[in-house]
Image (cartoon, grey):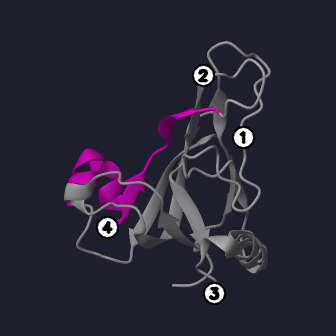
Amino acid sequence: LFRSSGKRSAVDKINRKFIDRMPGEAIELKAIHSHPTLKKFKPPIDEKDKAVGQTGLIDVIRIKRGCRLMIVDNLDVADGITNGQLGVLVDVVKTRSGEVNKLVIRPKDSSSGSRNRSKFPQLAAKYPDCIIIEKVSKTYNLNQKRKGDVGSSATVIQFPIKVRSEE
């Protein structure tokens, strides 16, 4: 599979086809965007990999239970939950209203996540050797090319993951 940044859109297409071919229900995770002054804010989305601004967070992520994922943020370095870590999606946890608010991931590196599991004892008991990932919030600077955006920033809230079609 392609790894260079010039091939990100090709990798994105391969990963989307991979998810489509997997059995089970596809789940779409849409990022939440906010801007302090613009009500109808349109976030900058990278055409190559669909990342929001310079955050590394993906605007819309399609996942299925059993798909391979990569964490794209250093969530807890001391606990081994870091950018680039691979794992498999075991399950999703939903709110009462049906919104996905946690991902249950079995990391490839089984030595990571002991602190993470202690934060979620009930889920850790149900899913041993898994880590629980929640959405993260990232604020980023906007390009100064657009009118009204000079020196402003926006916020995106999303799960810090990417789908990986290979180990």
Question: Looking at numbered disc 2 in the image, what kind of residue is underneath it?
Answer: Ser
Kindly identify which residue carries mark 2: 152
Question: Looking at numbered disc 3 in the image, what kind of residue is underneath it?
Answer: Leu
Kindly identify which residue carries mark 4: 128
Q: Are marks 1 and 3 in contact (CB under 8 Å)?
A: no
Which numbered mark, 4 or 1, is in the foreground of this view? 1
Kindly identify which residue carries mark 1: 44
What's the mark number on residue 1? Answer: 3
Q: Of marks 4 and 1, which one's residue comes earlier in the chain?
A: 1
Question: Looking at numbered disc 1 in the image, what kind of residue is underneath it?
Answer: Pro
Q: Residue furthest front?
A: 145
**Disc 3 element:** loop
**Disc 2 element:** loop
Which numbered mark, 2 or 1, is in the foreground of this view? 2
Question: Looking at numbered disc 4 in the image, what kind of residue is underneath it?
Answer: Pro
Q: Which residues are magenta?
A: 114-142
Q: Of marks 1 and 3, which one's residue comes earlier in the chain?
A: 3
Q: Viewer-proximal residue, 108 or 84? A: 84
Q: Of marks 2 and 1, which one's residue comes earlier in the chain?
A: 1
